[in-house]
Amino acid sequence: MAEGKVSMRELPDSPTLEVRISRRELLSHNRWNADYFEERFRQNEKKLKKLESVLLGEFIPEELPDGSKGITYGQVGPRKLSPRGSVRYLQVINIRDTGIDFAIKPDRVAEGSHNDPARSRVAVGDVLFTNNAFRGTETLIGRCVAVSRDYGKLNISQHIDRIRVDGIDPFFVCCFLKCRFGAVQVQRVMHGVDAMTISFGQIRRIEIPRLAVDIQFTVRKQYLAMSKQHDRAMAIKERLLQESGIEVGQYGEAINELANKNCDYKQAMEEAQARLRHVIGELEAVLDGKQKKIRPFSS
């Protein structure tokens, strides 16, 4: 391999893709699939360097003062649900863009059981990050929410990571992972791999800018306002589920259809979605250098 530029091409039976990169860039990433070096990934990397970004892992301790792990996943092994269990059990499908949807799959497990490990109990301020997806559901990987209030006893499946940060606001972290600068990094990691899984190490290596505390606080404030509307919608949805007595459906189709006919539910969800789009758009504008502050949401 000569010094200078390196030309990479996919195999003949794959879609044609050619990129030209330096030996230094190739070796620094140690990745040999051309997709990994798409221009959008490389431009995002350059922008993050200009923003003097640091590794997210700097804010994820191995262990926090209370003895909890900085990052962990839920129970592994046989799943035994308990309809009358006191612990709500979240799976990937429960993690929606605007927050947690308990109604779409209202599973529970027995407190203290194999399915309720203490290490993965969820608390306010935790970031829940989906670490796994199946073929055809790639958009689910990297979906995340920040836990905005106490939902009672709550645990997660092994396909969700529970992340606790120190030295950075968790609601800002969540919004960053949702915005273009964070989401593109997750997409890049998944290129050229067979297993649709993202590891703890890969999450720790996500780069994130050290934005001013006042900007992080504004993001937090707007995320919490969005969460209130999401929770309002979910309260209506759970009430409809209880009153109707219907089966939710394999993927929540039945309860979603019923909820979407309710005007109050639709209004709350539409506002939550609008507020989320706003804060993500504002954060991207700040990171792009188009503005210095996060502007307030106008309903």
Image (cartoon, rainbow, N blue to C red):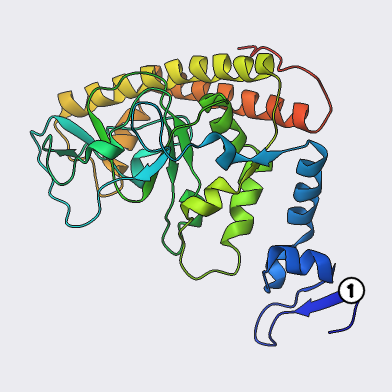
The correct choice, above or below, for 17 with respect to 46 in the image is: below
In this orientation, does residue 180 appear?
Answer: no
Find disc 1 in the rendering and name its residue.
5
Q: Where is residue 227 in the image (x, y as percent from the top left)?
A: 45, 20
Closer to us: 220 or 30: 30
- Where's the N terminus, which quadrant? bottom right
Q: Position of residue 133 (x, y in %)?
A: 43, 57
Q: Where is residue 80 in the image (x, y as percent from the top left)?
A: 12, 49
Residue drawn where x is 81% and y is 48% of the image: 46
Horizontal side, residue 67 vs residue 148: left or right: left
Q: In which quarter of the image is residue 291?
A: top right
Q: In which quarter of the image is residue 101?
A: top left
The correct choice, above or below, for 36 with respect to 102 in the image is: below
Extreme residue toward the right, this view: 4
Residue drawn where x is 44% and y is 64% of the image: 135
Horizontal side, residue 194 vs residue 161: left or right: right
The correct choice, above or below, for 172 with respect to 10 in the image is: above
Q: Three-letter amino acid code at disc 1? A: Lys
Horizontal side, residue 94 vs residue 178: left or right: left
Mark 1 packing: few (<14 Cα in 10 Å), some, or many (20+)? some
Q: Is mark 1 on a helix, strand or loop?
A: strand
